[in-house]
Amino acid sequence: MRQKSDAGRLTTLRWSLRGASVSIEMNAKPAERGNVTIEFQEVEYCVPGRHSAPILSQISLKILRGETVMLLGRSGSGKTTLLKLVNRLLKATAGTVFVNGASVDSMDPIRLRRGIGFVIQEGGLFPHYTVAKNVVVVPRMLGWTPVRWAVRYEEMMRLVGLDPKELGKRLPRELSGGQRQRVGVARALAADPEILLMDEPFAALDPVTRAELQREFAELAKRLGKTILFVTHDLREALRIGSRIVMLAEGRIVADAAPENFLRIDHPEVKAFAATFEVQSGARG
Amino acid sequence: MKLWEFFVSHRAEILEATLAHLFLVVISMSIAIAIAVPLGMLLAQRKRGRALVLGAASILQTIPSLALFGFLIPLPFLGGIGTRTAVIALILYALLPILRNTVVGLTNLDPAVLEAAEAMGMTQRQILLKVRFPLGLSVILAGIRTATVITIGVATIAAAIGAGGLGTFIFRGVAMVSDTVILAGAIPAALLALLADAALGLLERKLKVA
């Protein structure tokens, strides 16, 4: 395994697995040390009213300001559940989740959520709102003036590479999948939140658009310096976008490392994910 | 007497009956919408009691219309002979389709959109008014459309308890064994139903969000 670093640019990881060569550009910037933005302390989550095994258990994790943490795992590993504990869409059944040092349980959930950006598959856009109205939903709820939100709309659209004038009056159904996803990101960033939660945002896109958006988003994440929690089941995406990868299996954290070190971890789940590279590279011949 | 000749010679009487029929339908539907839509909005947010209320509305719907008019007549304050009793019966009949469609329209939505609304910090009231209601409006309107068509039909029976309307021709025709007189009531009633169905269908399609 070797690494090539290009100052100010993405880092490229070249990796060889049983003769197959794999190359991934990584967003491997070091996190700004210091402030812990999100912290999970001995967190457990069980579905209320069900006496089955907990979905998450013994989760302790500190996320620093400016980190892009990729929550990687198979379907059902608990990564989306972990994400939803941050903005209290779900409530931990044991342990505590802290945002900027305060327990989320002690915060007003509405205020908490308005201060955290959220992106899901297809952006979760409101189908009855135009693109412009979708983007400024949170600024409007926060009481921004129309002039301020109009300026912000244009800024956000340009930030995600879309034409604000051309698309402003369109409905989400009149956009392509990639455009919808970009609008979803613009909407999540519109109120300038410190934290961004992303739940498999690019999973429904075709491979080419997905790769394009991953590259663009990696650059964007680096530029904005937000604290980002990004759920994915795609190791390639995790390596490409994250500054840190946290792997979950059966509701527990089994690996936590910077992308350049992640593949060195000796854990069966990491190896299982790494093997997917072998399959993909082999398929390309 | 031929049907066309009957229509021409009794046009004033038929028009008066049609207006009386429309009055019954508009009053009943307005009150039914005013009850069922807010009640449906309440039930959409609370699962508790939803089955009970929808079940009660379903039972009302199963009572034969003539029997319901009969049951209402002896009731103090609500009953008696005339328009008031007919309006109450028509409201009871219209409740179920509107109520059921309101609950379905407000709850059967894309969970991703509702999750996004909650995650962005909308209050439950904002989610109801800004997301659920506009997205469910076409389904609610479909319920109103069904209820309107039912009400126009059932309102013809209201003539049996002296509420007037196009049913007076139908009952008179049955007593006289005259198809012409029956049709003088039945045709305008059918036309009213078709017209309401088409107009509300058009509005429903316009309000539908893909």
Image: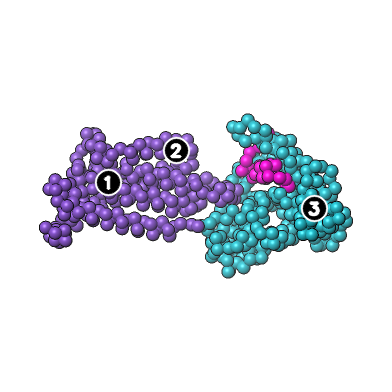
Residue B38 vs residue A24, the one in the foreground: A24
Q: Nearer the viewer, mark 1 or mark 2?
A: 1
- Can residue B11 be seen at all in this image of the molecule? no
Which quarter of the rendering shows the N terminus of chain A?
bottom right
Residue tagged 1: B154
> What's the colour of chain A in the image?
cyan
> What's the colour of chain B in the image?
purple
Answer with left or right where residue B104 lies relative to residue B113.
left
Q: Secondary structure at mark 2?
A: helix
Residue A33 - label: none
- Residue B47, position in %: x, y? 48, 38
Residue at 43% over, 60% down:
B206
Residue tagged 2: B50
Query: Label 3 amino acid?
Result: Glu
Q: Secondary structure at mark 3?
A: helix
Magenta range: A71-94
Residue A257 vs residue A8, the one in the foreground: A257
Measure how far apart labels 2 and 3 are at the Cα level.
Answer: 53 Å
